[in-house]
Image (cartoon, rainbow, N blue to C red):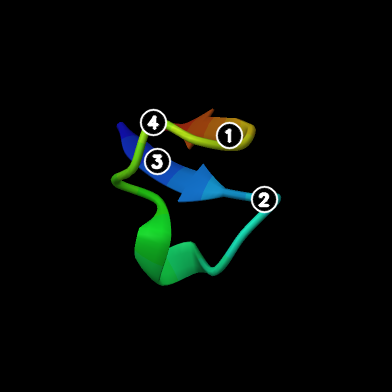
Amino acid sequence: MFCVNITANPKLGKKKTGRFIYTE
């Protein structure tokens, strides 16, 4: 799955902060 942070910079999507969308 690919994790995308929708509440911050997409480059920070690996952090555990903000909301994340998981797409297959």
Please give the residue where the numbered disc 4 appears in the rendered image: 16
CA distance separating discs 1 and 3: 6 Å
Write down the quadrant of residue 20 in the picture: top right
Q: Given this view, does label 3 or label 2 mark the residue nearer the observer?
A: 2
Q: Residue at x 29, y 46 (%)?
A: 14
Cα–Cα span, label 1 and label 4 = 12 Å
Read off the residue under disc 2. Answer: 6
The answer for how far apart the CA atoms under marks 3 and 2 are is 10 Å
In the rendered image, residue 7, in percent from the top left (x then y), is placed at: 70, 51
Are dots 1 and 3 in contact, CB under 8 Å? yes
Classify mark 4: helix, strand or loop: loop
Disc 4 or 3, which lies upstream in sequence? 3
The amino acid pointed to by label 1 is Ile
At label 2, counting other C-alpha atoms closer than 10 Å, the crowd grade (few under 14, some 14-19, many 20 or more) is few
**Secondary structure beneath label 1:** strand
User: Badge 1: few (under 14), some or many (20 or more) residues near its Cα, within 10 Å?
Assistant: few
Q: What whole-number distance in Å separates the C-alpha atoms at marks 1 and 2?
A: 7 Å
* Residue 16 rendering spot, x and y as whole percentages: 39, 31
Q: Could you classify mark 3 by the number of other residues whose Cα lies within 10 Å: few (under 14), some (14-19), or many (20 or more)?
A: few
Q: Which mark is residue 3?
A: 3
| Residue on which the image places disc 1 | 21
Q: Nearer the viewer, residue 18 or 2?
A: 18
The secondary element bearing badge 3 is classed as strand
Name the amino acid type tagged 2: Ile
First in sequence, mark 4 or 2: give its number.
2
**Distance between the alpha carbons at the discs numbered 4 and 3:** 11 Å
Q: Is residue 20 above or below residue 4?
A: above
